[in-house]
């Protein structure tokens, strides 16, 4: 970082704390609103615990990311600062993504599997299942990491747009904001908890994706571990995001979630299919990338045409 960037980073830490408190206040307000109104069992304490711990971890990870990456990849760090300094804030973002992507699937796997079996036994009620405590905790975890992502993307918006590209930058904003707004609201009204569980499980595919992205940013795209990491990421993407798609689509078609108010039900049916379509789109991009790696195109021969 230059001195100007260091000042901006120090200001960002204070802004992070304010935004974290605001996000926490939003969840508390939701809890206060829903606790007296709904008779459904809720676990707002678990969600708040997951949120607070992950937000604290994210703030610390972002603060030490520059030192960590520089120690792990000294040559790559120097190359990146010289050639693509806009990647520095994006690496802060990458540093906060790995741990939640590891412990979220571990936390909820057993309950998501049990909910899926219960939904298959009674498809009409598949989207009306009560979310267990672990799902509430995991929503707090992922909402915190996404909220912190949004803080970084807003604070370093110019560098983030350069590093990600404007299209992906806006896509991440939309993905995060929809999840942050709707997941905490959906759980207390039993709004597709099994779908949310699988959306949370899909974070597991980000572990190797982030690892691969970090290597590329440090100019290690030809590293000997790049091929197995890329193959492992594609496999994890298929396992976490593609294999469950037919079951989730089946639930969407067969479910009868009449217990929800019509406004909430309409909102759910508008937003529920979006991650399914996104996963198919991202799979097409992944297959295209894998094809380019495996099939080497012949060298292009230039021909000059002269007109007399």
Image: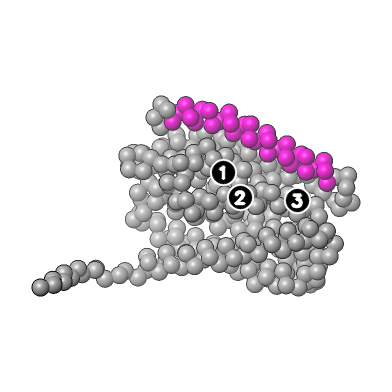
Taking the spot 84% from the left edge, 65% from the top edge, the residue there is 258
Instruction: Determine which of the numbered discs, if any, sits on residue 185 in the image.
Output: 3
Taking the spot 88% from the left edge, 47% from the top edge, the residue there is 37
Horizontal side of residue 93 vs 70, given as left or right: right
Q: Residues within 10 Å of mark 2 (few under 14, many from 20)?
A: some
Residue that label 1 marks: 149
Horizontal side of residue 96 vs 71, given as left or right: right
Residue 299: x and y, percent?
A: 24, 68
Q: Residues within 10 Å of mark 1 (few under 14, many from 20)?
A: many
Whether residue 211 is visible to the viewer of this picture, yes or no, is: no
Taking the spot 36% from the left edge, 43% from the top edge, the residue there is 84
Residue 58: x and y, percent?
A: 58, 39
Taking the spot 41% from the left edge, 26% from the top edge, the residue there is 3
- Give the color scheme: rainbow, by chain, secondary structure or one colour: one colour
Decide: is 142 above or below 269: above
Question: Is 174 or 208 nearer to us in this picture?
Answer: 174
Of the 4 image quadrants, the one containing the C terminus is bottom left
Residue 60: x and y, percent?
A: 56, 34
Residue that label 2 marks: 176
Q: Which residues are magenta?
A: 5-34
Decide: is 290 above or below 11: below
């Amino acid at each position: 970082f230059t001195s100007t960037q260091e000042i901006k980073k120090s200001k960002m830490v204070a802004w992070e704390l304010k935004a974290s408190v605001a996000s926490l206040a939003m969840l508390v307000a939701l809890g206060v609103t829903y606790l007296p109104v709904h008779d459904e069992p809720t676990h707002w304490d678990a969600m708040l615990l997951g949120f607070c711990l992950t937000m604290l971890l994210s703030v610390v990870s972002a603060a030490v990311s520059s030192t960590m990456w520089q120690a792990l990849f000294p040559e790559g760090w120097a190359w990146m600062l010289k050639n693509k300094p806009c990647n520095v804030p994006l690496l802060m973002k990458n540093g906060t993504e790995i741990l939640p992507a590891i412990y979220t699937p571990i936390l909820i796997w057993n309950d998501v599997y049990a909910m899926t079996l219960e939904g298959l036994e009674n498809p009409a009620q598949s989207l009306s299942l009560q979310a267990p405590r672990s799902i509430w905790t995991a929503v707090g975890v992922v909402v915190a990491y996404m909220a912190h992502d949004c803080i970084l993307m807003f604070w370093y918006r110019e560098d983030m747009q350069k590093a990600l590209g404007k299209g992906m930058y806006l896509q991440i904003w939309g993905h995060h904001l929809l999840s942050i707004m709707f997941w905490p609201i959906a759980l207390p009204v039993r709004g597709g908890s099994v779908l949310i569980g699988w959306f949370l499980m899909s974070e597991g595919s980000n572990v190797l994706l982030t690892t691969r992205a970090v290597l590329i940013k440090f100019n290690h795209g030809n590293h000997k571990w790049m091929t197995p990491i890329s193959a492992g990421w594609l496999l994890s993407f298929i396992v976490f995001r593609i294999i469950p798609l037919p079951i989730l689509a089946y639930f969407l078609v067969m479910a009868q979630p009449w217990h929800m108010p019509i406004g909430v039900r309409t909102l759910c049916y508008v937003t529920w299919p979006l991650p399914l379509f996104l996963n198919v789109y991202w799979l097409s991009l992944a297959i295209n990338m894998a094809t380019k790696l495996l099939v080497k195109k012949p060298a292009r021969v230039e021909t000059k045409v002269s007109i007399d």
